[in-house]
Image (spheres, helix red, strand yellow):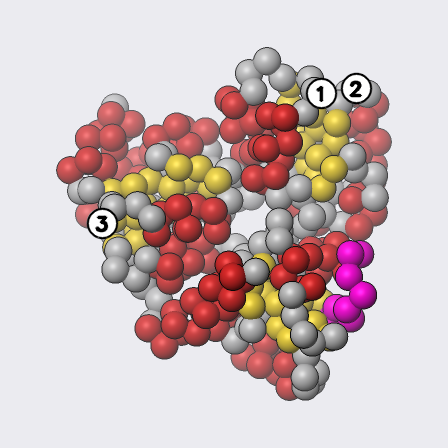
Amino acid sequence: MPAEDILRLKKEKNAVILAHNYQPGEVQEVADLRGDSLELSRAAAGEEAEVIVFCGVDFMAETAAILSPEKRVIMPEAGAGCPMASMITAQQLREFKAGHPGAAVVCYVNSSAEVKAESDICCTSANGIEVVESLEEETVLFVPDRNLGRYVARFTDKKIITWDGYCYVHDRYTPEDVRRARSLHPEAELLVHPECRPEVIDLADHVYSTSGMARHARKSSAQEFIIGTEVGMNYRLKQENPEKEFYPLSEEAICVDMKKTSLEKVLSSLVTLEPRVVVPEEIANRARGAIERMLAV
């Protein structure tokens, strides 16, 4: 069985397997750690393993490589990308900055290493407000997610200018999806991700990152939840809270790239220790600076 072979090879190769919350359930099952992208990368940096197997998309594995330059980072599915991260390039960001001299650049971690390297500081979906408030500048360029930028703007007096990027999974949610789900599950709490459109956020009970959703589900006295993020998150939530019920805000909230990873690909990557993710040193050093400035906040 692939799962048994994976667990055996993991020990032989001194590897740690990381799975993002949106990964297929079978992949989450063989992982040592599961969580959001930065949470996983930070955890991996503290592991003694020599090899990091990152089951996610490309920018996540890049972040792990940036934070653990002495380790070999492999990604089982080399073709797993993030459409939102691809909506801005380093050159486009340089031009964006040139048009707004004196503004600080806050870069969502869901971005390429090259874009991180051009940014002043990174943020996650959980700490965007704190990061923006920590800056001296009154004008902030927020890339690449317009919806997260608009959400952060609700909680600060700073002027936030957003890049026109978005996550196609979260951007597809509509108020009609909310009304439909509420009618089917009237007692359920609605948790949505800050990558959702403002009109969807306005209808939610709570707005959380995926890690925040996991914490809330454990602590809440509610027994039913409607989850407004990629459907893979429901697998983790149900495992951790078997006595509670979790319903997707939409059954169509599927990230195609996240679902490209399979047990067979994880096994193959452990056999070959490929495909390896390497970030050029000059880019990695600058990107690491933006990440470390965020962590200092």
View extreme (left): residue? 12
Q: Over which residues does the magenta segment extend?
A: 154-161
Q: Which mark is residue 187?
A: 2
Is residue 258 in sight in this rendering? no
Residue 203 percent across, percent down from the top left:
83, 39
In this picture, residue 90 sits left or right of residue 204: left
Label 2 sits on a secondary structure element that is loop
Front in this rendered view, residue 71 or 180: 71
Label 3 sits on a secondary structure element that is loop
Q: Which mark is residue 222?
A: 1
Reading the chain from its start, which is encountered first: label 1 or label 2?
2
Front in this rendered view, residue 20 or 76: 20
Q: Are marks 2 and 3 in contact (CB under 8 Å)?
A: no
Which quadrant of the figure contains the C terminus? bottom right
Q: Which mark is residue 50?
A: 3
Q: Residues within 10 Å of mark 2 (few under 14, many from 20)?
A: few
Residue 101 percent across, percent down from the top left:
68, 86
